[in-house]
Image (cartoon, helix red, strand yellow):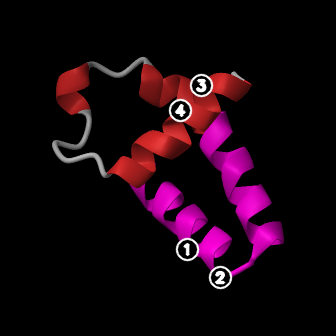
Amino acid sequence: MDALIDLNIYCEREGLAGISDHLIQAIESIAPTVRNLPITSLHPKIAPEHLKVLAVLEQRG
């Protein structure tokens, strides 16, 4: 999931909206599974950018 979020951030920064839209769809499709993982299985360091994307997904969900 972190890799998809990183790619999405890059695409948004570079103006690749079409690709970003597809990445957001992929992130949304796997987000429920990731949300249900035990906290110990998540990556130990979550970047602020990742938290921002996850917060947006929470609002959409």
Q: Tag 3: Cα neighbours inside 10 Å, few (<14), some, or many (≥20)?
A: few
Q: Position of residue 34 (x, y in %)?
A: 44, 30
Disc on the earlier residue, 3 or 2: 2
Relative to residue 31, is residue 25 depicted above or below?
Answer: below
Residue occupying the point 31% across, 52% down:
47
**Is label 2 in a helix, a strand or a loop?**
loop
Give the distance between the C-alpha atoms of the residues marked 1 and 2, in whole angstroms. 6 Å
Say if 6 sits above or below 29 in the image: below
Q: Gap in Å between the C-alphas at discs 3 and 2?
A: 24 Å
Residue hosting label 3: 58
Disc 4 target residue: 55
Residue drawn at x 42%, y 17% is 36
**Distance between mark 3 and mark 4 Cα atoms:** 5 Å
Callout 1, which amino acid? Tyr
The answer to whether marks 1 and 2 mark residues whose Cβ atoms lie closer than 8 Å is: yes
Magenta region includes residue 61: no
54 shown above or below 50: above
Q: Which segment did they paint magenta?
A: 1-29
Residue ID for mark 1: 10
Q: Residue at x 55, y 65 (%)?
A: 9
Q: Residue at x 66, y 24 (%)?
A: 59
Alpha carbon separation for disc pair 1 and 3? 21 Å
- Secondary element under disc 3, as helix, strand or loop, is helix
Figure check: 9 above or below 57:
below
Question: In which image quadrant can residue 11 be found?
Answer: bottom right
Label disc, if present, on residue 14 of the rendered structure: 2
Query: What secondary structure prevails in the magenta region?
Result: helix
